[in-house]
Image (cartoon, rainbow, N blue to C red):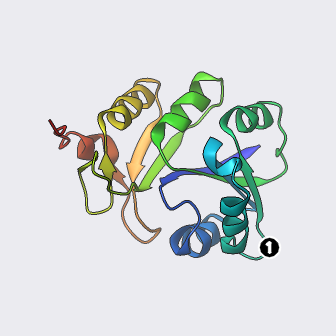
Amino acid sequence: MAITAVRIDGRLIHGQVANLWTTKLGVSRIMVIDDKVAASDIEKSGLKLARPTGVDLSVLPEKTAADHIKRGGYDSQKVFIVVKRPQVLLDLVNDGVKLDTINVGNMSQTDETTQITNSINVVQDDVDAFNALHEKGVKITQQMVPGDSANDFMEILKKFKPKN
């Protein structure tokens, strides 16, 4: 499979992913990897409605996605992987999936998160997953839309001060 891009975006498929990123990347499939979303018919239906015309969609639990990727299930396609949190990508890498670069887009704010940019909010588990991915040689960038410059996310992450 040609993994064209990997993005962390808590909103999964929405205007930026569906219109800007998918068009810029020229992908033929968006692969949403999320155990809870894959188990929800309602959420899957919403993602199907949000996907761009002419682009295939897979909504898969983590283990199934890793198995499909490793066995070459989508080798003839240009795939854009979208997940909500970095731990999913760390699990994939630990399961033998090769990821070169991850783009951090939007991680929504909750009562537990700490804001590190206008659109990225993290908890300590996220920071730990980012650090582990970085240690495994995965390049991590921050870029909201294709027209923005890609920034070194690990430099941005240094601003993180956990909530007490």
Tell whether 46 sits left or right of 105: right
So how many labels did they put on this image? Answer: 1
Q: Nearer the viewer, residue 20 or 45?
A: 45
Q: Nearer the viewer, residue 119 or 100?
A: 119
The reply to whether residue 34 is visible in this rendering is: no
x and y percentages locating residue 125 in the rendered image: 36, 32
- Please tell me which residue is depicted at 28% across the width and 45% down the height of the picture: 112
Type of amino acid under label 1: Gly
Q: How crowded is mark 1: few (under 14 residues within 10 Å), some or many (20 or more)?
A: few
x and y percentages locating residue 19 in the rendered image: 59, 76
Q: Classify the position of the N terminus by image quarter.
A: top right
Tell whether 136 sits left or right of 54: left
Tell whether 57 sits left or right of 159: right
Residue to which mark 1 is pinned: 54
The picture quadrant where one finds residue 34 is top right
- Please tell me which residue is depicted at 61% across the width and 71% down the height of the picture: 18
x and y percentages locating residue 82 in the rendered image: 59, 52
The reply to whether residue 79 is visible in this rendering is: yes
Q: Nearer the viewer, residue 72 or 46?
A: 46
Q: Is residue 25 above or below residue 72?
A: below
- Please tell me which residue is depicted at 41% across the width and 31% down the height of the picture: 129
x and y percentages locating residue 29 in the rendered image: 74, 59
- Mark 1, secondary structure of its residue: loop
Q: Classify the position of the C terminus by image quarter.
A: top left
